[in-house]
Amino acid sequence: MEVTTMKSTKVEYAATGAFSQTISDYLCCSPQLQPFYNHFPTLQAFEAQLKEKTFSDAQRQTLHQALQQQYTSLAGVNPAVQQNIDLLLQPNTFTVTTGHQLNIFTGPLYFVYKIITAINTCRQLQQQYPGYNFVPVYWMATEDHDFAEINHFSLFGKTYTWHTDQKGAVGRFKLNDMEPLLAELPEAYPVFEEAYRNSQNLADATRAITHALFGEYGLVSIDGDHPELKKALTPVVEKELTEQLSHKLVGEASAALEERGYKPQVYSREINLFYLADSLRERIVLEDGKYKVLNTDLIYTLEEIRQEAQQHPERFSPNVILRPLYEELVLPNLAYIGGGAEVAYWFQLKQLFAAWQVAFPLLMLRNSALYITRGNASRMHKLGLQPQELFQDYQELKKHLSQQLHEEEISLETERQSIAAAFKEVEKLAHSIDPTLVKAVAAEEQKAHNALQLLEKKLSKARDSKHEQTFKQLENLKDKLFPNGSLQERQDNLLTYQTNNPDFIPALVAAFDPLEFKFTILEEE
């Protein structure tokens, strides 16, 4: 198969119209947001972060053992991944982390974009700080229980859905009932089919998939649903149960953000913990002095729930407020990479990190991209459009094209005058020979006049029809590049592009600059 060459164009995020004011202000280092984060992510800023992040040998041993155990689910581990897992034992090794739900078949494209941003950040850091090691990490949201968000993906415009009655943390879901979905696929996708058919649960399958796709880049995938890792969270669990510390601190940060005109992304509960068991992930609430697990018969006194946390830390699951703190407790992490909404909600957490004396990571917006296939690139150029113009809405683009297509009004007035002059001479001749013929000449002139008028209308209609075809082509192009009116990366799946371009991931790795903070347009040539 021939190699697909790519043309890359970068545009400002604000120019796409697809990102919030909060993110635009952050990327511009607005003073309004500076109290809510530690360092703005530049290569130089990582030097301070390296000094601030502490991670003991004991923590490294625990992390290494957990990863070694988790990677036994694979038949073999890529040497680049194994090397990175082992490097985590070294005091000069740090991580750059992104996290995401366990979307089947990787879900929307931004799942892949997040991971590539982490990989490329580590590459740049390795060049800048050769005395350290940097490991890209994908934090698998295995404890998430919102199955409806991950049970489907879109491929070539069709949605494929995994139907199951299982409940609780999705990482623990068995895969026996995925066979009908696999049978429905339009062609064979070995990486995914083998992972889903040969893994014990969705967490293991997702690890197998990310390992197959990104193993050569040394990506390490970690599952926080692990008893030894959860021990690091036990002090947080106890304070959460007794003092509701996170609720207070996040509430204060949220109010401060609102005062500056920024809408908080997440809202804290009094207790930001779930109780986790097989087929169960339910909120813990404090009512009448007792700790209750919603939608169950489980009720604990303070002493009983403390004992539960000590003996079974794996039964306590942090929600969106406490998960970032958990990640930073179990990883030697320097930066967290997220989408716009994720980065924005981390702004609510700085005080919480300070209370636990945990270094607040650099917050990085993941790379975003618009991928234009060769066919769509051809359509774009035929329409006379530049890649950066595609972010305008359809009506704006239509107006733009109309101006480009503008031609003088179709008029046959000159021809009419020529014919009138010709008939004038014929009329003179007729009058000199036989005056009774003048009326016949006038009738023929009227016929000629009518014929020109009809042709004028037909020509105008034909031109308008030609323009309508152009507008229809524009509409189709917008629909393909912005499905359902949103960014392609939020709708389309990896396989939509990798199927026809096996070098899709390497092309993204080559194109993405994680610290440039610009939107990437990739065009097949």
Image (cartoon, rainbow, N blue to C red):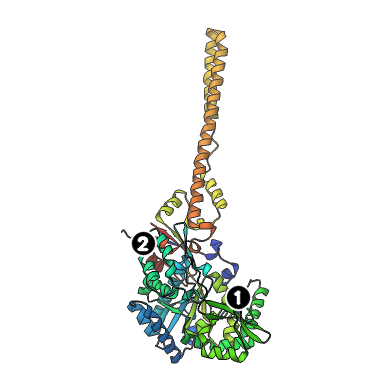
User: Is there a contact, CB below 8 Å, between mark 2 and mark 1?
Assistant: no
Three-letter amino acid code at the position of disc 2:
Ala
Residue 328 rendering spot, x and y as whole percentages? 50, 83
Alpha-carbon neighbours of circle 2 within 10 Å: few (<14), some, or many (≥20)? few
Task: Determine crowd level at label 1: few under 14, some 14-19, many 20+ residues with C-alpha closer than 10 A.
Answer: some
> Is residue 93 at least partly visible in the picture?
yes
Q: Earlier in the sequence, mark 2 or mark 1?
A: 1
Residue 50 in sight here: no
Give me the C-alpha separation between circle 2 and circle 1.
48 Å
Image location of residue 230, percent across then percent down? 50, 85
Q: Which mark, residue 465?
A: none
Task: Point out the image quarter for the C terminus.
Answer: bottom left
Location of residue 432 with respect to 336 vertically, above or below: above
Q: Residue furthest left?
A: 1
Q: Say if 31 sits above or below 401 in the image.
A: below
Q: Position of residue 519 (x, y in %)?
A: 49, 65
SS category of the residue bearing label 2 = loop
Kindly state the secondary structure of the residue where label 1 is placed: loop
User: As displayed, is residue 447 above or below residue 374?
Assistant: above
Amino acid type assigned to the residue bearing label 1 in the image: Leu
**Residue topped by disc 1:** 33
- Residue situated in front as seen by the camera: 408 or 118: 118
To which residue does mark 2 refer? 188
Q: Quadrant of the N terminus?
A: bottom left
Q: Quadrant of residue 259?
A: bottom right
- The residue sitting at the front extreme is 297
Toward the viewer: 258 or 112?
A: 112
Q: Nearer the viewer, mark 2 or mark 1?
A: 2
Please, is residue 277 above or below residue 398 in the view?
below
Residue at horizontal 54 percent and vertical 77 percent from the top: 280
Residue 242, given in percent of the width and then of the height, sits at 63, 88
Q: Quadrant of residue 70?
A: bottom left
